[in-house]
């Protein structure tokens, strides 16, 4: 029985994690989780799961829920996230929140030597050097939940890391993959949220449309697998069947394939090094699919991906600034205060103006993150 703490229970990854837990009660128990402002869904989950500890975003919501569920402990805010992450009974911590808000709680879980199943790429982008150093120090395994990094992890299993030639991340191309750059003028929020292959939250779906999501994944791959950026490629793959590949010195290429279902990498992170049946999973039928398509990435078309590579090669606080600028700009686009192409423009302006600090400490990272968000809002206003 693995006892689990989960951040982001009402999000897409969080709900799919809960599906796996409930489908395998003999293997998993969800002891503590966090939610945001979706209090109705929180009530439903508390009733269904009967956890020991729940954190919400607002203090008032915590008070109300505490009265309704006196046998569950409720907390709130950043402090609450850390309490969930460090719950003394859990051995597995799943970080499924969006944005850099998951950083402090991840470090806290690492300091308790928990198994870290991480779907929060922003934590590794903004503070990868800190996270990996602390994970090594406290012997806390980092298990990737992103489908691409799980695929890389599985394709490296049992192999000599020194024999790796390059990592190949696949990308669907997002909701606008069939549009030219000129055709992106005037696209709507509704258009951008219509992903062709995956069902995800709003922020990550927009990131997929700009390809910043893939840029963040490139940085994440660099951090997780200690691979130079020149040896990390991105390949457009419309069907999302091959989730990523590893090429070795002898020209062999190892790939992980499967139907698009985020429960596969989530469950793999929870059960590693074992595998169990995926309840309700659809098996891959290549004969039925018939063809797979691949295409090189055009960095002029997907400018956000180029910005991510640039920031990654520079390192330091520009990674934090780039990520914070993207989060702020995507939020503004979802609020219909800027256009789709202005997301990239905001990020580039922030990066051009940023005074980079290499190997920043946690306090510096959090300061840069906060100030960048204010800067983007002020730029637009």
Image (cartoon, rainbow, N blue to C red):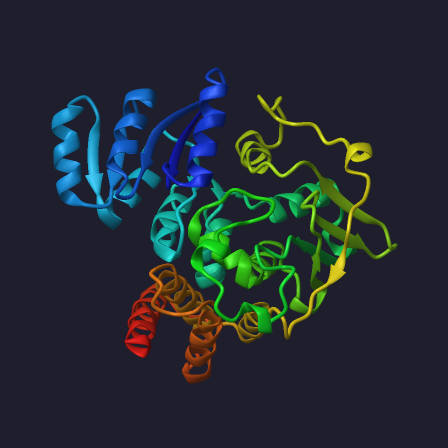
Using the rendered image of the protein, determine whether residue 309 is visible from the camera's viewpoint.
Answer: no
For this view, does 164 lie left or right of residue 200? right
Q: Quadrant of residue 68?
A: top left
Label count reads: 0
Is 101 placed above or below 110 here?
below
Is 334 placed above or below 298 here?
above
Q: Quadrant of the C terminus?
A: bottom left
Query: How far from the left and from the top, in percent, is residue 183?
Result: 58, 69
Is 253 placed above or below 259 here?
below
Using the rendered image of the protein, determine whether residue 356 is visible from the camera's viewpoint.
Answer: yes
**Closer to the camera in the image, 139 or 6:** 6
Q: Residue furthest top?
A: 26
Query: How far from the left and from the top, in percent, is residue 140?
Result: 48, 43
Is 314 placed above or below 251 here?
below
Residue at position x 43%, y 51% in the image: 202
Q: Quadrant of residue 62?
A: top left
Query: How far from the left and from the top, in percent, is residue 349?
Result: 43, 80
Residue at position x 59%, y 47% in the image: 196
Query: How far from the left and from the top, in percent, is residue 227?
Result: 66, 61
Q: Quadrant of residue 266?
A: top right
For this view, does 177 lie left or right of residue 125? right
Residue at position x 46%, y 27% in the image: 19
Residue at position x 21%, y 25% in the image: 72
């Amino acid at each position: 029985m693995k006892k689990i703490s989960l951040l982001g229970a009402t999000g897409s990854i969080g709900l799919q994690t809960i599906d796996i837990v409930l489908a395998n009660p003999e293997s998993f128990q969800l002891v503590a989780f966090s939610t945001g402002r979706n209090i109705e869904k929180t009530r439903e989950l508390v009733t269904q799961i009967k956890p020991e500890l729940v954190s919400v975003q607002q203090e008032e919501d915590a008070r109300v829920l505490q009265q309704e569920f006196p046998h569950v402990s409720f907390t709130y805010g950043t402090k609450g996230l850390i309490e969930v992450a460090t719950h003394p009974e859990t051995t597995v911590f799943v970080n499924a929140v969006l944005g850099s808000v998951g950083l402090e709680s991840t470090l806290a879980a690492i300091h308790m030597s928990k198994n870290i199943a991480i779907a929060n790429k922003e934590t590794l982008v903004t503070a990868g050097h800190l996270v990996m150093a602390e994970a090594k120090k406290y012997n806390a395994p980092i298990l990737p939940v992103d489908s691409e990094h799980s695929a890389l992890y599985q394709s490296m299993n049992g192999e000599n890391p020194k024999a790796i030639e390059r990592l190949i991340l696949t990308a669907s191309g997002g909701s606008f993959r069939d549009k030219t750059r000129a055709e992106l003028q005037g696209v709507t929020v509704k258009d951008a949220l219509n992903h062709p292959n995956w069902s995800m939250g709003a922020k990550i779906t927009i990131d997929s449309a700009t390809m910043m999501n893939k840029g963040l994944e490139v940085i994440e791959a660099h951090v997780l697998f200690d691979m130079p950026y020149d040896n990390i490629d991105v390949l457009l793959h419309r069907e999302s069947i091959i989730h990523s590949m590893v090429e070795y010195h002898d020209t062999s290429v190892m790939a992980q394939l499967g139907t698009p279902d985020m429960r596969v990498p989530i469950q793999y992170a929870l059960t590693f090094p074992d595998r169990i049946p995926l309840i309700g999973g659809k098996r891959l039928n290549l004969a039925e699919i018939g063809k797979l398509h691949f295409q090189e990435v055009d960095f002029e078309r997907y400018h956000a991906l180029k910005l991510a590579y640039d920031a990654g090669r520079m390192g330091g606080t520009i990674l934090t600034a780039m990520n914070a600028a993207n989060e702020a700009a995507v939020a503004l686009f979802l609020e219909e205060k800027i256009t789709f192409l202005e997301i990239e423009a905001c990020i580039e302006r922030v990066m051009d103006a940023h005074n980079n600090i290499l190997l920043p400490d946690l306090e510096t990272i959090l300061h840069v993150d906060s100030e960048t968000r204010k800067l983007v809002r002020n730029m637009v206003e």
